[in-house]
Image (spheres, rainbow, N blue to C red):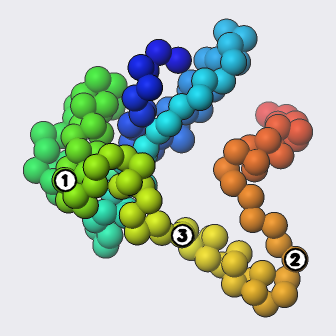
Amino acid sequence: MALNNRPLVAHNAAFDLGVIRDACELCELDWPQLEYACTLVVGRRVWPGLTTYSLPFLAAHLGIEPAADHEPAADAACAAEVACRALQTREAAGLLELLAQGESKSAKLRRAEELRAEGREIEIIGEREFARMLEGFAAPAA
């Protein structure tokens, strides 16, 4: 994918990556190697305790001109500005450094680790592995 070795930044990146994945499958293209950052995740790490982490709310919190309601180019510019503000706030040299700072675990991952510590057999897998597991299941009939 022609991103010139630059990371992809999006808010709620899982949605955008799903669109890219579906487009690649439809066009019978290989899934590209992408580095990406999700400003939803970044927002939760950099500014904990906010009421919500929606893009309009984060923009307002940071004094950024909010994007028009789900207008892609405006959303992209807003997400980029949120990422830049996060880099400044954390004084990080780049997205990889920012994402590595204060690595936080989700409540689900913490609970899984607690169950494992109690001696329960539990396998902790990543999002990609989970998606691969689900591929084997047929969608329910409508």
Q: Earlier in the sequence, mark 2 or mark 3?
A: 3
Q: Residues at badges 1 and 3 in contact (C-beta under 8 Å)?
A: no
Q: Vertically, is 32 above or below 103?
A: above
Residue 49 location, x and y as percent? 31, 72
| Mark 2 crowd level (few <14, some 14–19, many ≥20, 10 Å Cα) | few
Q: Residues at badges 2 and 1 in contact (C-beta under 8 Å)?
A: no
Q: Earlier in the sequence, mark 2 or mark 1?
A: 1
Looking at the rendered structure, the number of numbered marks drawn on it comes to: 3
Residue 127 location, x and y as percent? 67, 50
Residue occupying the point 54% across, 41% down: 14
- Would you say 53 lies left or right of 124 here? left
Q: Earlier in the sequence, mark 1 or mark 3?
A: 1
Q: Amino acid at mark 3?
A: Lys
Q: Vertically, is 56 above or below 51?
A: above
SS of the residue at dot 2? loop
The residue that disc 2 covers is 121
SS of the residue at dot 1? helix
- Comparing 113 with 64, the one in front is 113
Q: CA distance from mark 1 to mark 3?
A: 23 Å
| Mark 3 crowd level (few <14, some 14–19, many ≥20, 10 Å Cα) | few
Query: What numbered label is drawn on residue 88?
Result: 1
Q: CA distance from mark 2 to mark 1?
A: 42 Å
Residue occupying the point 13% across, 44% down: 64
- Comparing 57 with 28, the one in front is 28
Q: Quadrant of residue 3?
A: top left
The residue that disc 3 covers is 105
Q: Quadrant of residue 78?
A: top left
Front disc: 2 or 1: 1
Q: Amino acid at mark 2?
A: Glu
Extreme residue in the bottom direction: 118
